[in-house]
């Protein structure tokens, strides 16, 4: 099986506004990452760690790379999120909001190449690249992630903060 990014995006665009978009996106992403080495070989080297490959009002497609040891502080997306890993090992810690401002750790999942993680609109997660290799994945969101007003949460105090580049960098330094 070969992988074509153009076809991948075309297929996602065709289903993103369907009533069963979540199930369809899951299937398309699952197929894309089913053979992680084939996918890796078909992708270019993306110079940036975060690359927006496509976005419109109902769909975002990103390539995301985390370097080993990187911690991403707890955050929300507020739109359905689909994470397909094809390289590395990525630990996802999940949280729930018990009151408006208090996070409770609710579990974790370690993704291996070929694994898919689906998160609903209320999901809050933190990510750690736990492998010696970078963690690389295709991320699909049912919405325009770059325009969603969303939150980060302080890893110790759990205080809610706006998701801005400045706050993201600040919290990353705290958990290193
Ligand atoms: Fe995330």
Image (cartoon, rainbow, N blue to C red):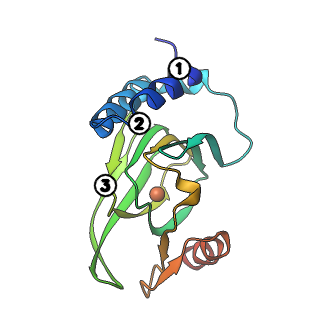
Q: Residues within 10 Å of mark 1 (few under 14, many from 20)?
A: few
Residue at figure coordinates x 52%, y 64% from the top left: 72
In front: label 3 or label 2: 2
For label 3, the crowd category at 10 Å Cα-Cα, with few meaning under 14, some 14 to 19 and many 20 or more, is some
Residue visible at 43% across and 27% down in the picture: 14
Packing grade of label 2 (10 A; few <14, some 14-19, many >=20) is some
Alpha carbons under labels 1 and 2: distance apart: 14 Å
Of mark 3 and mark 1, the one earlier in the sequence is 1
SS for callout 1: helix
- Nearer the observer: mark 1 or 2; the answer is 2
Which tag, 3 or 2, sits closer to the chain's start?
Answer: 2
Separation of marks 3 and 1 at Cα, in angstroms: 25 Å
* Residue for badge 1: 7
Observer-nearest of 95 and 97: 97
The answer to whether the beta carbon of the residue marked 1 is less than 8 Å from any atom of ligand 1 is no
Image coords of residue 108 (percent x, y): 30, 60
Image quadrant occupied by the C terminus: bottom right
Residue 87 % position (x, y): 51, 37
Q: Which residue is mark 2?
A: 16
Please tell me which residue lies in front, 55 or 103: 55
Residue occupying image coordinates x 68% and y 28%? 44
Name the foreground residue: 14 vs 97: 14
Query: Label 3, on which residue?
Result: 120
């Amino acid at each position: 099986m070969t992988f074509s990014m153009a076809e991948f995006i075309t297929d996602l665009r065709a289903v993103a506004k369907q009533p069963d978009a979540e199930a369809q996106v899951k299937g398309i992403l699952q197929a894309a990452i089913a053979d992680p080495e084939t996918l890796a070989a078909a992708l270019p080297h993306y110079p940036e760690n975060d690359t927006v490959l496509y976005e419109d009002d109902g769909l975002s497609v990103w390539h995301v790379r985390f370097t080993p040891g990187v911690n991403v502080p707890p955050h929300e997306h507020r739109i359905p999120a689909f994470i397909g890993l094809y390289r590395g090992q990525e630990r996802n810690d999940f949280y729930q909001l018990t009151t408006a401002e208090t996070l409770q750790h609710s579990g974790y999942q370690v993704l291996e190449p070929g694994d898919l993680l689906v998160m609903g609109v209320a999901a809050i997660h933190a990510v750690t690249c736990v492998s010696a290799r970078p963690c690389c994945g295709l991320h699909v969101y049912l919405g325009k992630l770059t325009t969603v007003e969303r939150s980060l949460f302080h890893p110790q105090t759990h205080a809610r903060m706006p998701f801005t580049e400045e706050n993201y960098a600040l919290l990353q330094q705290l958990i290193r």
